[in-house]
Amino acid sequence: MQQDTGRIVQDGRTPALSLGAWVAFALALCFFSGVFYRAPEAWKFLGALDFTTLLGRFGEMGGATFAGRGGAGARQGFLYAVTLFPGVMAAMGILAVLAHYGALNVAQFLLTPLFEPLLGVSGRCGLALMTSLQSTDAGAALTRQLYEEGSIGLKGLVVLSAWQYAGSALVAIYFSIVSALFPAFIVPVWVPLCLIFGLKFLGGALVRLALSTLYRADFS
């Protein structure tokens, strides 16, 4: 069974980190972290660097999208699946371009010291995790891609899935649905967000511990 080494080595060497790679990683942070999601009016133009903003929304026909209302069964399920295509395809396309310029190598360099002790995976997984903060479907697709290319093993796949499942699409949901409760908060709005984000790491670490102890025989 494939082992999670936590590091990806190319040709026996650590890839060189060029200026372009750092710029690509910075762009990836802007696109997938949600930092520019629903930016203030004066900075609204920065929404062009946000993944959710770039995705936009479907137009309406008679007050509903092309999927309509009141559907059921396989046909409605198929139409719902079609609505997922833009997010998944856009995320994989953007990441492929950024990876070409070295964004994943920078992510590996910066995030491996954090992800390896806590989750047991390489920092290359960071962009997939960041994407899942805005889109669960795109995050899942990128995680599967990491598994298929050998960047993570089966154990890492389960740990990353646990990290993403808890508080999925955190940024998108927090600022779209939970924002209705912001006036009632007795703490700054960023405190619950940081708490949930920290608990995602705690959950991932606990799942990793369970796989390394209770289910060690299955993931050795």
Image (tube, rainbow, N blue to C red):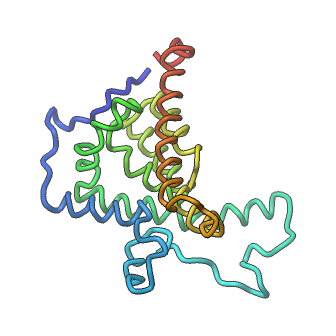
Q: Nearer the viewer, residue 187 or 10?
A: 187
Q: Is residue 59 visible?
A: yes
Q: Residue furthest top?
A: 217
Residue 184: image quadrant is: bottom right
Q: x%, y% of residue 143?
A: 47, 45
Left or right? Give the position of 122 relative to 101: right
Q: x%, y% of residue 138?
A: 51, 56
Q: Which residue is depicted at the point 50% across and 69% down?
A: 52
Q: Residue furthest front?
A: 186
Q: From what the image shows, is residue 57 above or below residue 77? A: below
Point out the image quarter for the C terminus.
top left
Q: Which residue is depicted at the point 15% across and 32% down?
A: 12
Q: Which residue is depicted at the point 54% across and 21% down?
A: 210
Point out the image quarter for the N terminus.
top left
Q: From what the image shows, is residue 175 above or below residue 210? A: below
Left or right? Give the position of 43 relative to 64: left
Q: Nearer the viewer, residue 210 or 70?
A: 210
Q: x%, y% of residue 191?
A: 49, 54
Residue 59: image quadrant is: bottom right
Q: From what the image shows, is residue 67 above or below residue 187? A: below
Q: x%, y% of residue 86?
A: 55, 68
Q: Which residue is depicted at the point 38% across and 52% down?
A: 127
Please give the count of numbered marks on the rendered protein. 0
Q: Is residue 154 visible?
A: no
